[in-house]
Amino acid sequence: MKNELFNLIDKLEKEQSLTLGEYQKLIENYDSELSLYSAEKARKAAEKYYGKKVYVRGLIEISNFCKNDCYYCGIRKSNKSCQRYRLTKEDILACCKEGYALGFRTFVMQGGEDAYYSDEILCDIIREIKSLYPDCAVTLSLGERTKESYQALYNAGADRYLLRHETATKEHYEKLHPHALSFDERMRCLRDLKDIGYQVGCGFMVGSPYQTAEHLARDLKFIEEFSPHMCGIGPFITHKDTPFAGEKSGSADLTVFLLSLIRLIKPNILLPATTALGTIDGKGRERGVLAGANVVMPNLSPLSVRKKYMLYDNKIATGQESAQCVEELKGRMKDIGYEVAISRGDAK
Ligand code: SAH
């Protein structure tokens, strides 16, 4: 068995593809030795394209109003204890200004699905950022919109869009979301984003309620087939004011192992070591980079709203100024032999 697993990693490295059954076997039987073996190969693969550089994205959490009620998410509509906020254009531009001075060349605007941000309002903000900082990329992560809306935002200058698929298994999707949200619609959005020409990021939570190894195998197969430019994965973390408050959080070990598998599937993919991974494990982001991740996304949101964008309990860096987050991260990366790059950080 043990040899068989190592052989599967070798095969994945060579062919960038395994069968669903093979992925499942790896997920069900991995141990720390296999994980280290995979991490070493994944790190080499990342290095071939990106050297020992880590790209940074400045994350601006523009709103925690959301019309959706995802069972796992702390900013879901029904959470009455969530104090809602939204940033104005001026707030967002101030974050970009600070971020630019700190070396960021990508700004990610993320938020709940907040109807206040019409195409008109967003296009105006995107155009302004692109005209003030033509050397920067604008990434959006604002959930599901119509194809026309995605097209308008793209025409205004948005370069990338992050929309996690959350799970590639329809039955599982339906256990994580209420009826109003559909797996098919999520997939429609991802296809539209790609057709329009965005650099697209998908992704999923590790250890979300009801998730099985077979589901995760399907997530890996989906990444093979959809071939996104980016993929964001992090452990599911319980939030006390959601229907999943009593569920167990996901594991850092499995997340790190999956990062390596994803790197081996798509050697040039943009792969973040996420905030959720850094939250569940104090050295999570370092472990992620050492397992093949090449992106980190420090928070550029104004300090006054940090604690309000609580997707899950105990999210890190909610009490830190942006500059502090960046300095800390640079130090952490340096300690493991990596350097934070001042660059738009497009996929190679
Ligand atoms: N509204 C946007 C942005 C969502 S927040 C959208 O729909 O894409 C970004 C990601 O945070 C989500 O896609 C989800 O995968 C993750 N997330 C939400 N709640 C979480 C939790 N409790 N634990 C870990 N990750 C969570």
Image (spheres, rainbow, N blue to C red):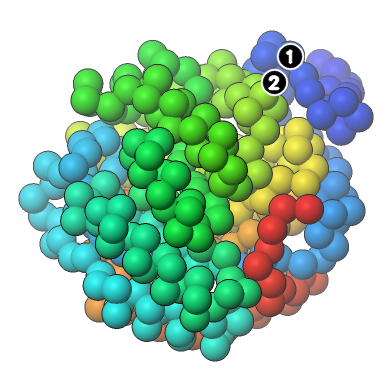
Above or below for 189 versus 84: above
Horizontally, residue 220 falls left or right of residue 154, namely right
In the depicted view, which residue is nearer to us: 80 or 48?
48
Above or below for 82 versus 76: below
> Can see residue 27?
no
Q: Quadrant of residue 173?
A: top left
Q: Residue tagged by mark 1?
A: 19
Q: Identify which residue is drawn at 13% across, 62% down.
A: 83
Q: Secondary structure at mark 2?
A: helix
Mark 2 residue's CB less than 8 Å from ligand 1: no
Q: Position of residue 17 (x, y in %)?
A: 79, 23
In the depicted view, which residue is nearer to us: 28 or 88?
88
Report, in whole angstroms, how far the alpha carbon at label 2 lies from the one at label 1: 6 Å
Q: Identify which residue is drawn at 26% across, 47% down.
A: 113
Count of numbered labels shown in the rendering: 2
Which marked residue is nearer to the observer: mark 2 or mark 1?
1
Q: Position of residue 282 (x, y in %)?
A: 53, 62
Horizontally, residue 106 falls left or right of residue 338, namely left
Residue type pointed to by label 2 = Tyr
Q: Quadrant of the N terminus?
A: top right
Residue type pointed to by label 1 = Thr
Can you tell which mark lies on residue 200?
Answer: none
Dot 2 and dot 1 residues touching (CB under 8 Å): yes
Q: Residue tagged by mark 2?
A: 23
> Can see residue 1?
yes
Q: Identify which residue is drawn at 43% across, 68% down.
A: 127
Q: Identify which residue is drawn at 59% across, 43% down.
A: 197
Q: Quadrant of residue 247?
A: top left
In the depicted view, which residue is nearer to us: 342 or 82?
342
For label 2, the crowd category at 10 Å Cα-Cα, with few meaning under 14, some 14 to 19 and many 20 or more, is many
Q: Position of residue 249 (x, y in %)?
A: 40, 40
Above or below for 286 versus 149: below
